[in-house]
Amino acid sequence: MAGVSVKLDAVVRTGGVQRSSKVVFGVLGFDFPPFQTLVNGTPNGPDFDIVREVFARMPGYELDIRVMPLKRVQHDIQSGGIDITTLYKSPARLSQLLFPDQPIRWSIYKLVVPAGKRFEFNGIEDLHGRSLGKLESNVISQAFDTAAGNKDFELYELKSFKVMLNMLNLERLEAIVGHAQIIDYVALTMDLQGRIEFLDKPVRPAKEFHIVVSPQAQISDPEALRQAISISLKSMLDDGTFDAIYDSYGLVFERN
């Protein structure tokens, strides 16, 4: 799909001529609500809004947006065919790509219960004897999966959070486990947000989702770009921009 250039006001001066450094942003070409949806092929959602705002605060850069399949994004971010994209942080990627200091969000897995039905949760052992739901084939953690295999609790593996939330609302499950912001979004679409609540402690360490910069980027100084993104993201976190973007979608920005 052809790229869509987003012209920003910031420019750099070279030899008396003002020009901006173009940064090619490879956007993953699929829907992942609530973080990203494609509307007539155009990205929309909190992830995309955050990246645009990052660059709106960065003098000297012009964002060139290209919607691409996942495999091409993964190839081009390694080869320098694109300058930036958004990916989860992992040890392998940390050694291959440049990560800004601040993620754009965290994948935080929590337990959700019917409103007024909270229970104490400090570790997997506190789930003993309870009835729980999770998505089919969704790996939670080694400790959770070991406990499930030992039948320490009754686990229902279901096809969607919508099914699970209906069961939770009917109290056919004591809790469901999964990505907190996705569950919150599905509850919003079902008008159930006031009828559920999240337990405070996550069930596993959070995973960071980042803007990443290719060391092979065509721009002149990839490390300078990484540092500029870090500064921009911190300012957005400090001034409440993350919260405002999520609030515009009826969601809450989850900090780790």
Image: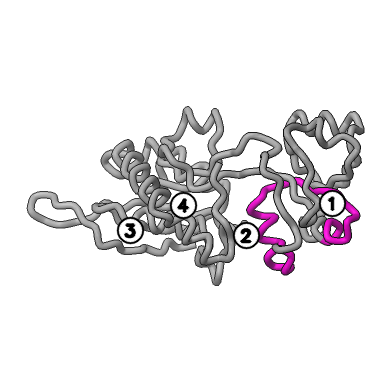
- The structure's colour scheme is one colour
Report the Cα–Cα distance between label 1 and label 4.
33 Å
Residue 67 in view: yes
**Residue annotated with mark 4:** 26
**Residue annotated with mark 1:** 158
Q: Residue at x 60, y 38 (%)?
A: 206
Q: Amino acid at mark 1?
A: Leu
Cβ atoms under marks 3 and 2 closer than 8 Å: no
Residues packed near mark 3 inside 10 Å, few (<14), some (14 to 19) or many (20 plus): some
- Measuring from the top left, give residue 56's x and y in whole percent: 33, 58
Q: Amino acid at mark 4?
A: Gly
Give the mark, 3 or 2, whose residue is nearer the N terminus: 2
The answer to whether residue 49 is above or below residue 232 is below
Q: Residue at x 84, y 30 (%)?
A: 147
Horizontal side of 247 relative to 198 (left or right) equals: left
Residues packed near mark 2 inside 10 Å, few (<14), some (14 to 19) or many (20 plus): some
**Residue annotated with mark 2:** 33
**Residue annotated with mark 3:** 56
Q: Secondary structure at mark 3?
A: helix
Q: Is residue 183 magenta?
A: yes
Mark nearest the camera among 4 and 3 is: 3
